[in-house]
Image (tube, helix red, strand yellow):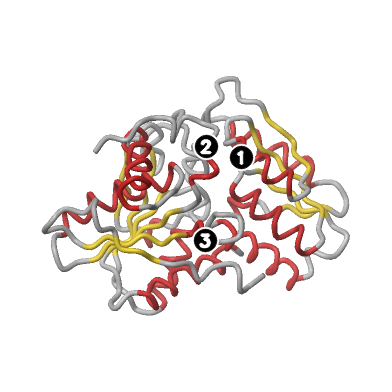
Amino acid sequence: MHTAVGNTPIVKLRKLVSAGDADVYVKLEYYSPTGSYKDRMALSMIEEAERRGTLRPGMTVVEYTGGSTGSSLAFVCAAKGYAFHVVSSNAFAAEKLDTMRAFGATLDIVHSPTGKNTPGLVPAMMARAGEIAAKPLHYATDQFRNRDMLVGYAALGNEVLAQLSAPPDVFCASVGTAGMLMGVAGALKARGMQTKIVALEPASSPVLSGGAPGTHSVDGIAAGFVPPLFDRALVSEVRTVEESAGREMCRRLAREEGIFAGTSSGLNVVAALQLARELGAGRTVVTVACDSGLKYLSGSLYAEPASR
């Protein structure tokens, strides 16, 4: 399993970056087994719990999730022989729900009347997962509070350093649990890097920026509260991105760069290109393609035409 998770390629954008801008590199995390960077955190959350003895054979793993974390945990639990009980919602991509079922997970659906991620949805999912996890022989991975994921995401930061000829000037990424951004930031800091860390969120739910939580349709990020793992001391800037710009960028990435990814990846690249323009030539910005566009084909993301 360890040889399959991580060690993903990094590619330089060739067509979307304007002359005179910094170079932009995108880490293609959809090369992991479930097509998502969440495979890293799922594996480290399970294996760190096994090492402590808090997760043992015969127990059931419990998690609340928009689908990518759930798909990754379902994959890891299937490979290791654990039962997996998921709390999710109709607000998230049907492909993700179906993937969890395919790996043998039991799904508990919290209904969203609007079909979108509203401010109260994730707290409701968390509460339901807490009820299930209170049963005997159940173990809650509790992704928003689980520092074990930082072990898995630190490897991503170390891979970036190994793959580039020089440390990046900026690393930017949208925030869900904040585990990936914090894991990468911690790894870079531990090795003495001065890389600027930029946290991203949808403009419609600018909680990290000090605004009010709002409704949006970007799976896996902006839960409506500041995640416990989010450490402002490691972050140089918080930047908002319009969801519509992120969705358009997804379609342009596919058609112009051959990168087929989901909505949060589009937000990441929109911000990376903004930062590249601000930094100028001779500098480097790195971001992440979080998951595969294959997870979004039943929705409207790729049904809309891309402008050029």
Quick one: label 3 or label 1, which is nearer the N terminus?
Answer: 3
Depth-wise, is mark 2 or mark 1 nearer the camera? 2
Whole-number angstrom distance, CA of label 2 to CA of label 3: 18 Å
Which residue lies under the disc numbered 2?
297
The kind of secondary structure element at disc 3 is helix
Whole-number angstrom distance, CA of label 3 to CA of label 1: 17 Å
Quarter of the C terminus within the rendering? top left
Is 106 left or right of 198, judged from the image as shown?
right
- Say which quarter of the image contains residue 198: bottom left
Question: Within 10 angstroms of label 1, few (less than 14), some, or many (20 or more) residues?
Answer: some
Quick one: label 2 or label 3, which is nearer the N terminus?
Answer: 3
Whole-number angstrom distance, CA of label 2 to CA of label 1: 8 Å
What residue sits 50% from the left and 51% below the top? 291
What residue sits 59% from the left and 36% below the top? 122
Question: x%, y% of residue 273?
Answer: 25, 51
Question: Within 10 angstroms of label 3, few (less than 14), some, or many (20 or more) residues?
Answer: many
Quarter of the N terminus within the rendering? bottom right
The kind of secondary structure element at disc 1 is helix
Identify which residue, 206 or 266, lies in the foreground.
266
Callout 1 amino acid: Glu
Callouts 2 and 3 close, C-beta under 8 Å = no
Is 208 left or right of 35, judged from the image as shown?
left
Which residue lies under the disc numbered 1?
95
What residue sits 23% from the left and 63% below the top? 23
Question: x%, y% of residue 126?
Answer: 66, 40
Which residue lies under the disc numbered 3?
31
Callouts 2 and 1 close, C-beta under 8 Å = yes
Callout 2 amino acid: Leu
